[in-house]
Image: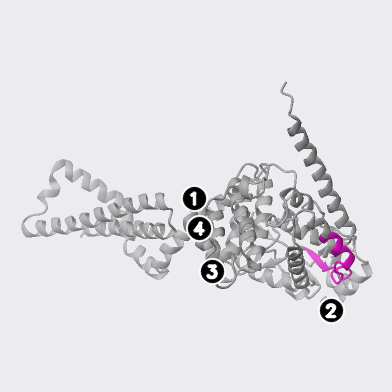
Amino acid sequence: MRVPSFAHQASDFARQEEGLSDRDLRFRLQQMGPAAAAFGRFLAARVDLLPWHLCMALEQIPDYAEPQNPEMVHVLITRETGASPERAFLRFDPAPIESRLFWQSHAAQLAEFPVVVRVARTDSVVRMIDAESQRSIREELAARGVKESEFHGALAAFRREREAAATLEADLAAFAILARAGVAPEIHGYLSGRYVLVHGQYEAIPTGVPPSPEQAQSLALAWLTQALEGGVFPVEPVRGKLGIARDGRVVFAAGPFATLPEKRQGRFKEYLLAMAAQDPSRAYPHFVAAVESGEQSPNAELKRRFMQMAPFRDGFHARGDLPQFAEEVLTHWKIARECARPDESAITFFRGLFHLVRTTSSMAPGRDSLLEAIYELRVRSVFGQALSVFKPAEMAALMEQYATAFLRAPENLDRLLTGMASGESQGRESGRARLTSHARRGNGRVLLAALCAAVLLLQKLAASARSSAIEGVLAILLVAIGAAVLRMGSRGDE
């Protein structure tokens, strides 16, 4: 039996002491009240700012508060809906089914189907962290290497986010956008307002169930689509704020929500695509443009560390808690914070990415759902480029034009093979007509051969460079080859 060295034992003891200290801070934040607990949960995603082990401890802070006064709930629902809960709903359960830090939910019944009535917590939203608690938290974080300016910056960002989410109006507006993509629960707007939100029931994603790689990849793709191409995305895509619709779709059931500027969406998308293709040289300029605000002078240190990044050295040792690709991306965030000034929208994006990775890793252990979703997003983008070239009306006309060729393809092939075997095909053509026919078919074959050669060349380029632009051209040429084959088949019937 191998006996561990004294240095190894000392390291284990230090980690145990570190863990105890992290848990102490977590419990103190919980005891300071809902606002301080929510701030701890906010900091849990800041792996660019805090040690990994502390983020894992703060992540365990429960999103829970004691239910608020039933009379206050009655007043809010009456004021928002214009009727008491007993009259607004066929059935209303006064006991909440969940009571979170900033809102609570009640089960209810409309005429035909069950709904959930979400009520904002007016007893805790208005209260912020007091000065004494702020000082205590600042000192605890300073002992872990967090600068005072970084603490105040994080606290200010938390305040802005919570002030925007003090009511349910932001969630209601976000759901209206997410509903267009089919990733939001059904909202009953005529019963919803500033402090009350009524939505359809959905199946929560439970814990302790067998891994579900399909759901994990579906969640990652839905989040990436909303963050990089949509109008709004959830900042905390965690299990308690996600659901599964009746048809199996993932739905984002709670905020906070955020939006990336359109230019940053494109930059982040190109950065992730390039990193997925293992091309940091192409990824770096997109990354810099995505994380920094305004015109920045060239940052040699940021570029050097980005290009030479190694998670075990530059980032946080996740002890196998994160897939390799996700750890590389989050390490880039940490490097950017140390070498530059990341924009607040970029920080919000990375916070959401962190929660996404943690959630999908728990749903599908051992799988890199983020990387798989990026590959799928890239394939979908390539097809989107091809479809943008051929307008739907033109494609419909083209398919209609060659529909007969499709239907007669087996018959034509059989006739061609029979003629080649018996020599009849040459007997049917003579003189100038045969020469014209051969010339026309020869030109078509030359065109088809050229297109095939171009596809093979571009395929090799795409495999080596993994360029979305090359893949777009490749998809267009494949469509062109299909059209050429159909055209040649139709002319052969003339």
Task: Name the N-terminal-most of marks 2 and 4.
Answer: 2
Q: Determine whether label 1 and label 4 are within 8 Å by CB.
A: no
- Decide whether residue 125 is among the magenta residues: yes
Tag 1 residue: 278
Which numbered disc, 1 or 3, marks the residue closer to the eye? Answer: 3
Disc 3 element = loop
Q: Position of residue 169 (x, y in %)?
A: 75, 74
Tell me if mark 2 has few (under 14), some (14-19) or many (20+) residues whose alpha carbon lies within 10 angstroms of its own: few
The amino acid beneath tag 4 is Ala
Which stretch is magenta? Answer: 115-138
Please provide percent x and percent y for residue 148: 77, 63
Q: How is the image coloured?
A: one colour
Task: Give residue 451's quadrant in the image.
Answer: bottom left
Other-residue count near label 1 (Cα within 10 Å), few / some / many at <14 / 14–19 / ≥20: some
Residue that carries the numbered disc 2 in the rendered image:
82
Q: Is residue 223 magenta?
A: no
Q: Is residue 288 visible?
A: yes
Which residue is located at x 79 percent, y 57 percent? 141
Q: Which residue is mark 4?
A: 283
Disc with the residue nearer the chain's start (2 vs 1): 2
Task: Determine the CA span between mark 3 and mark 2.
Answer: 57 Å
Residue farthest to the top, as pictured = 1
